[in-house]
Amino acid sequence: MTARVEHTDVGAYALGLLEEEDRVAFSAHLRTCAVCAVELRELSGVADALGGIGRPRHGDAASAGGERAKVIDLPRHHRATGRRARRGTFVIGAAAAVTLFAGGVAAGAALSGEDAGAPAGHSAHGPAEDAYRRGVPVAGTGTGGITGGLVIETKGWGTHAVLELGGVTGPLECELIAVSLTGERRVVTGWAVPERGYGVPGSPDPLYVHGGVAWEPVGITRFEVRTRDGDTLLTVAV
């Protein structure tokens, strides 16, 4: 029987909890689905946290290992309630497990007089802003005081695009669109701009969003930020 593939499988795949048939099917799905590939990259931090919790300290190997096993085995224990239900709630449950366990570790460190501190490599920024800061932005041409830039990365599945946008107020619904050399257009990602806006007085921080498109960078001529009403706010030639 052919394994079912659903976008919600990405959380279970990140922690290796899919059954073999589903794992093989989802691996093939990742090669053609840019959205799942980007989400899998974002969830890698959750998977690392679950994989690293409960490491033994000061002779507590048995206790820590047991607690780690309990946390990781929770999704397995609830498989009987239905595969679809597990898929829909898996990411929330995993994130909650990380939060609760990390909270216990931090509290224990505080009581023992130790400073748990921030984890190595921790960033106060979101994944989109981090990716933008690591890259080499290409400045865009905006209208009405709108500014922004774009960082693009070549991926095995296509192109990962990270947008910085400022000088925009809402309410608006916007999309980042890739335009090919032949004029074909594909939506990379979409978002809403609240009334307060981004990169304006009273709300000085710019907006950072990212997404993916199946085309390679050499096949793309430009990216556009457009409203749902069809107005072009920013154009980035690549």
Image: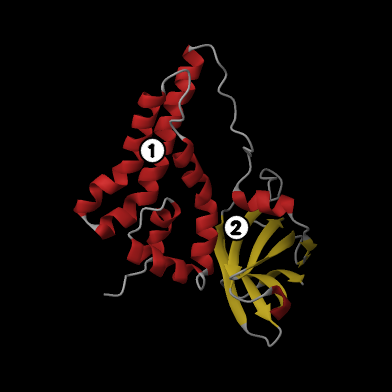
Residue type at the position of mark 1? Ala
> Mark 2 = which residue?
170
> Would residue 89 be found to the left or right of residue 203 on screen?
left
What coloring was used for the rendering? secondary structure
The answer to whether 5 appears left or right of 115 in the picture is left
Between 115 and 191, the residue placed more toward the observer is 115
Instruction: Estimate how packed mark 1 is, as few (under 14), some (14 to 19) or many (20 or more) residues with alpha carbons within 10 Å.
Output: some
Could you tell me residue 116's position as x and y percent? 55, 23
Residue at 32% x, 36% y is: 70
Q: Is residue 175 above or below residue 98?
A: below
**Location of residue 43 in the rendering, given as x and y in whole percent from the top left corner:** 50, 51
Residue 203 is marked as none
The image shows residue 158 at horizontal and vertical percentages of 62, 72
Q: Judge whether 122 appears above or below 229 on screen.
A: above
On the image, which quarter does residue 217 sit in? bottom right
Label 2–label 1 contact, CB within 8 A: no
Is label 1 in a helix, a strand or a loop? helix
Q: Secondary structure at mark 2?
A: loop
Q: Nearer the viewer, residue 128 or 108?
A: 108
Q: Residues within 10 Å of mark 2 (few under 14, many from 20)?
A: few
**Quadrant of the drawing holding the N terminus:** bottom left
Q: Position of residue 237 (x, y in %)?
A: 77, 73
**Which residue is denoted by mark 1 in the rendering?**
97
**Label 2 to label 1: alpha-carbon separation:** 36 Å
